[in-house]
Image (cartoon, grey):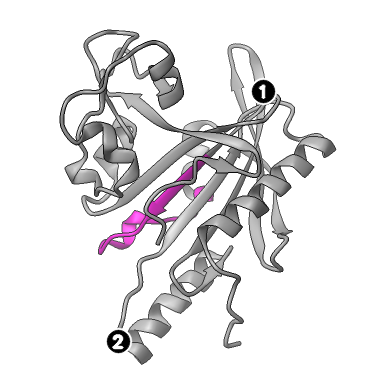
Amino acid sequence: LPASLPRDVGGWSGSPLWHCHDEQCLAVFSETQLRAQGVAPIAGDGADAAEAWPPVARLQPGYRCPACETGLLYTVSPGEQRQLPADTRLLRSRYESPGGGESFTVTLVASGTDRGSLHRPELCLPAQGFVMTAIRLAGTGDGASVKRMELERAGLGGRARIQLLYWFFNGERQTASHLVRLFWTAWDRALHHKAPRWVMVTVVADAASETDRDSRGRLTAFTDALRARLHPPPLPAPF
């Protein structure tokens, strides 16, 4: 499995995200923003957490929040740290377009021994206020598929529209289906007496314009480039 998210994907520059754990603040910064503001990392291992796949239970803070000046910044949100099983691993980076103005947020969640580490995004997004307006399989450049979701959420500034793509992979296989992932897990346990760690990848188009045709094309091209960096071509299914 990858040790970190790549810094560059198809010309898009990536930067790990850091979340303030002060419940009155909850600010989110990219590492690039923190460095531009001259925020010094906390001494120790915390600032390297985004590169080392530490489990959620062993995460250390990397910075002190420049917004509230009291909260500590972690590579997961407070809710994720509370809810994810202790041996789950998570990486997240924001990728900025070469010309600026667009960004994609990529999250990798690696399963632990608890099956609750991974689940379909369809299960939790409604609880976050999102309405799914479309969901379908979308082809990829390597001949596989990813799940593409179009979402809306009402806010103070009106209705925000985003796109979310997701799929699962381990060291041998990849799939856009949660059920197929569960099949492969049972297959490997029963026939090969092994339990490879699975990773769920989500790519979120942050800009509200990401539902137009040109933006969909950029998102598809970015996803193809990301997949080529993360894992090998898909293996054929046994059915």
- Inspect this view and state whether residue 134 appears: no
Place of residue 38 in the rendered image (x, y in percent of width and height, measured from the top left): 35, 12
Q: Pick whichever, 200 or 217, lies toward us.
A: 217
Q: Residue at x 51, y 73 (%)?
A: 173
Q: Which residue is mark 2?
A: 193
Where residue 90 appears, x then y in whole percent? 36, 46
Q: Residue furthest right?
A: 213
**154 or 168, which lies in front?**
168
Taking 221 as reference, is 59 left or right? left
Quarter-wise, where is residue 98 in the image? top right
Residue identifier under label 1: 100
Which element carries disc 2, helix, strand or loop?
A: loop
* Label 1 SS: loop
The answer to the question of whether label 2 and label 1 lie on touching residues, with beta carbons closer than 8 A, is: no
Instruction: Give the amino acid type for the residue marked by disc 1 in the picture.
Output: Gly
| Label 2 crowd bin: few (<14), some (14–19), many (20+), radius 10 Å | few
Q: Horizontal and vertical percent for residue 162?
A: 65, 33
Mark closer to the chain start, 2 or 1? 1
Residue extending farthest to the bottom is: 191
The residue type indicated by label 2 comes to His
Q: Residues within 10 Å of mark 1 (few under 14, many from 20)?
A: few
User: Which residue is rendered at x = 28% and y = 60% of the image?
Assistant: 112
Give the residues drawn in magenta, as a range: 106-122
Position of residue 13 measured from the top left corner of the image (x, y, whole percent): 57, 34
